[in-house]
Amino acid sequence: MLFNSLTFAVFFAGVLTIFWSLKSWETRKSFLMVASYVFYGTWNPPFAALLFATTALDFYLGARMGNAIEPRARRVWLVISLLVNLSMLGFFKYGNFLLQNFEALVGLLGVNYKVPHLDIILPVGISFYTFHSLSYTLDVYSGMIKPTKSLRDFVLAVSFFPQLVAGPIVRAADFLPQCAKAPVWSRDRFLWGLWLMNLGLFEKVVLADALLSGSANSVFGHPTALGTLDAWTGTIAFTGQIFFDFAGYSTCAIGAALCLGFQLKDNFRFPYAAVGFSDFWRRWHISLSTFLRDFLYIPLGGNRLGIGRAALNLIIVMFLGGLWHGAAWTFVAWGLLHGCYLVIERVLVGIFAAKFNRPSRYIEIFFGLITYGAVCVGWVFFRAKDFTTALRLLQSMVGLSSGGEMILSTREILQVGVVTLLTLIFHWRLKNKTVEETASELPGWVLGSAWAFMAGAIVITRGISNVFIYFQF
C-alpha cells in the first residue's frame, strides 16, 4: 500500500475517522496496532508474522535485561537480540549476495563450485523495522530507557505504519513515551500534518518522478558512453530524484503521524546546502546517521582514541552504512567513498581550521558547491547497476569517453537544470530553518495557495508515479 495511491488515501481516511472517534486511549492504540499490521500485510501477509516474532522477542529480551542484576547477563541478552535481528536481516537481504561472493572467492582459488540460488523474497522495510526494534534493546542495555511493560505499546512502536517500511528510523526511546498519554486533538496540528503529507507527495510524484526520474533512467540505463553534458545531467537528475523521493516519503510519514497525534523527528534538513560531508550527514537521512553514530561509531571509540583510529571508525561505519542500503558492492563503494570524504575533511579541517574559522558567505558557498559535486559523484555508484556502468558514466562526466552520445533533449536538460537550480536556492535560503519555522512566517493565503498548487500538480502527474526508491532497502 503506497502513500502515492488511492488505496492508501481511503485506508488513511478510515484510520483517522475511527481513531479519533474512539474514546479510550488503550482502545485507540490497539486499533492503531491492528491497522499498522493490515497496512504491512497488504504486501505479503506471512511477513507480518515475521515482523511480530522479531518484535515480541526483543520485548522479551528487553524485559530480561531489565531484570538482570549482573552486567554479564545483560550483555548475553543483548547479544541474543543482535544475533537474531542481524541474522534475519542477513538471510533475507544478503543471503544470495553472500553465496555469490563465496562462489567467486573459491573460483579464484581454482575450485569450480556453483552455489544454489535461494528464492528469497525480501520483506518490505526489513532494514528499517530491524533497526526500530534493535534500538529498544540497545537503549535498554545502555540504561537510556526502562523496559516497557506493555507488549502492545512496543509492537505499535515498531510497526507504526507511517514510518514502518521506509523510515524515518524511529527509536523506541522517542516513541514509547508518546504512548503513555493520549494526544489531545488539535486542529492546527491536524491541518499541518495534512499539509506535510501534501508536500511529501508533491516531492515524490511531481519532482522526483515526473520531472527527474526520466532523465536519470535514460542516462543510467544507456549501454554506451555519453556526452559530458548528458552524463552530468543524468547524474544531477538522480541527485535530485533520490532526495525528493526519500525526503518525500519521510515528510509524508511525519505528516501522517501528526494527524494521529504522534511526533516524529525530521529526517532531512536541506542537505544540498551542506558545507562539508560531516554537515551533509547531519542533514541527510538523519535517523540512520544518528543510529550509526550512537550505536556503532561511539562504541567503536569515536574520535577519542586518536586521529588514526577515528579515521578507521569512520570507514567502518560508512562501509556498513553503504551495505545497509543494499546487497551490492556498488552500495559498499558509495559508503566507502563517503567514508573517505569524511576522513579527508577531518584532516583538512585540522590543517586549515584556523584560517577558515569564520569563512565569508562566498567561501561558504564555494565549499558547499564542492560538497554538492562530490555527493553527485557518490550517487553514481549508488544508482549504477554495476561498476561497469558507474565507471563508464564517470568517464563520460570528465570527458574521457570518445564518441559519447547525446540522448537527452534540450527540454529534458533545461527541465533538470531548472529543478536543480531551484532546489539549491531553496536549500541555501532555508538551511538554518525547519519547514515549520518557514511556514510560520508566511501568511495563511500563501500556504493555502501552495497547498492548492501542489495538490493540482499531484493530480495531473500521478499517472507516472513510481514505487518509492527506499522500499527496496
Image (cartoon, rainbow, N blue to C red):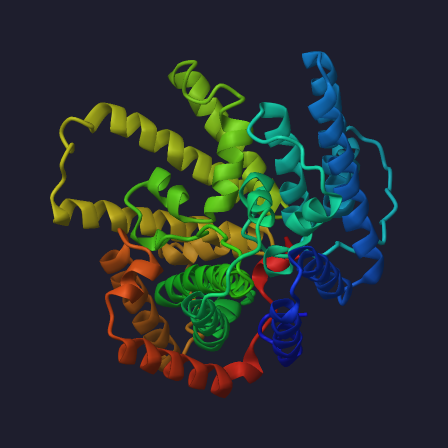
384 in relation to 77, above or below: below
Q: In what quadrant of the picture does the N terminus appear?
A: bottom right
Which is more toward the observer, 50 or 374? Answer: 50
What residue lies at 60% left-to-right and 52% top-to-bottom? Answer: 386
Residue 64: image quadrant is top right
Image point 53% across, 43% down: which residue? 174
- Whole-percent x and y of residue 440? 28, 65
The answer to whether residue 391 is visible is no
Provide residue 395's location: percent of width, then percent of height. 43, 53
> Image height check: is 208 above or below 178?
below
Q: Is residue 198 left or right of residue 48?
A: left
From the viewer's perspective, tell me whether residue 131 is left or right of residue 243. Answer: right
Residue at 74% across / 37% down in the picture? Answer: 59
Q: Nearer the viewer, residue 305 or 233?
A: 305
Front-most of residues 152 and 209? 152
Is residue 16 in view from this perspective?
Answer: yes
Instruction: Locate residue 51, reporting x and y percent.
Output: 77, 50
Q: Position of residue 330 (x, y in %)?
A: 57, 46
Q: Quadrant of residue 135?
A: top right
Task: Kindly identify the residue that appears in the image at 30 percent across and 66 percent down.
Answer: 439
Number of numbered discs on residues: 0
Q: Nearer the viewer, residue 133 or 114?
A: 133
